[in-house]
Amino acid sequence: MNRMSEILYWCERTGRNYWEYVQQCEDEDIWDYLAEVWKTMREAIERGLDQEGVLPGPLNLRRKASTYYIKAKGYKDNLRSRGLVFSYALAVSEENASGGKIVTAPTCGSCGVVPAVLYHLQKSRDFSDMRILRALATAGLIGNIVKHNASISGAEAGCQAEVGVACSMASAAASQLFGGSPAQIEYAAEMGLEHHLGMTCDPVCGLVEVPCVKRNVAGAVNAVTSAQMSLAGIRSAIPVDEVIDAMRRIGA
């Protein structure tokens, strides 16, 4: 199946979740692969938080992740939570900009969103690695649906196809971790992409630094918000498949 509506119907008919659909369609080594993905994501965050100095290239952009991480830890409650998400997304994006090892989720330029959200939720809510891997399976499913029906290329469809899709993936993953139903997860994915429609790909000097790094931060925060709204019982009249199609047409 290649549309979210079809897979959602399968989930509701069988009582299963999206990660179980992924498990049914993939070989057994999918979990070993996702474990490697998660390990690489975690290491990118931890390396990025430890790095200082200036990113390579003519913009002389100073790394911010480590400084912001230290500041965020001193904040109180809600501000600290958001600040930590900021620092994790910055860390991965800065690792990408400096040629470090990252996971394309779904692309290099949008690589900070999914890891930031999942790393923060695991740290703050003590989710097991297995639950994180299942959330990654769902995130990957969303990314593949978009790739099949539209695009995940910024050059082809704008930053909506990169940071927008990354936000959609992270929104769905977070909603699942919080116990969302398949319908709520679908809505989280829809909202994560919907609010990035029309975002162009416009990096200064062609580098994934300005505004790309900060867009990863915004995408991560939007993903957490989208998951929370879906779990609050808010429903959209627009299915995610229609938003994906709209994104494709806007990109064209």
Image: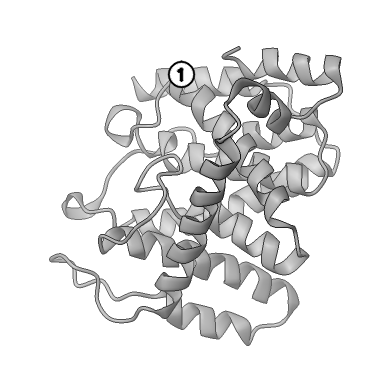
Give above or below for 11 relative to 173. above
Q: Is residue 139 visible?
A: no
Q: Residue at x 57, y 39 (%)?
A: 169
Q: Residue furthest front?
A: 28
Give the quarter of the image for residue 201: top left
Q: Is residue 245 above or below residue 164?
A: above
Query: Where residue 149 sits in the image (x, y, percent)?
Result: 47, 16
| Residue 113 shows in the view | yes
Name the element at disc 1: helix
Q: Quadrant of residue 95?
A: bottom left
- Where does the image place residue 249, in percent across and percent down from the top left? 41, 17
- Farthest residue, direction bottom: 74
Looking at the rendering, in which quadrant would you find the C terminus? Answer: top left
Which residue: 60% across, 50% down? 222
Residue 198 lies in quadrant: top left
Name the residue furthest left. Answer: 58
Q: Is residue 50 left or right of residue 207?
A: right
Task: Please say which color scheme the image uses.
Answer: one colour
Category of crowding for the residue at label 1, using alpha-carbon neighbours closer than 10 angstroms: few (below 14), some (14–19), many (at least 20):
few
Give percent across and percent down for residue 26: 58, 25
Name the kind of residue labelled 1 in the image.
Answer: His
Locate the N terminus and report the quarter of the image it occupies. Answer: top right
The tally of labels here is: 1
Residue 51 in the image: above or below residue 123? below
Q: Position of residue 243 (x, y in %)?
A: 56, 23
Q: On screen, 146 above or below 215?
A: above
Residue at which label 1 appears: 148
Taking the image as shown, residue 146 lies to the left or right of residue 28, namely left
Q: Residue at x 52, y 78 (%)?
A: 69
Which residue is located at x 51 percent, y 66 percent?
Answer: 88
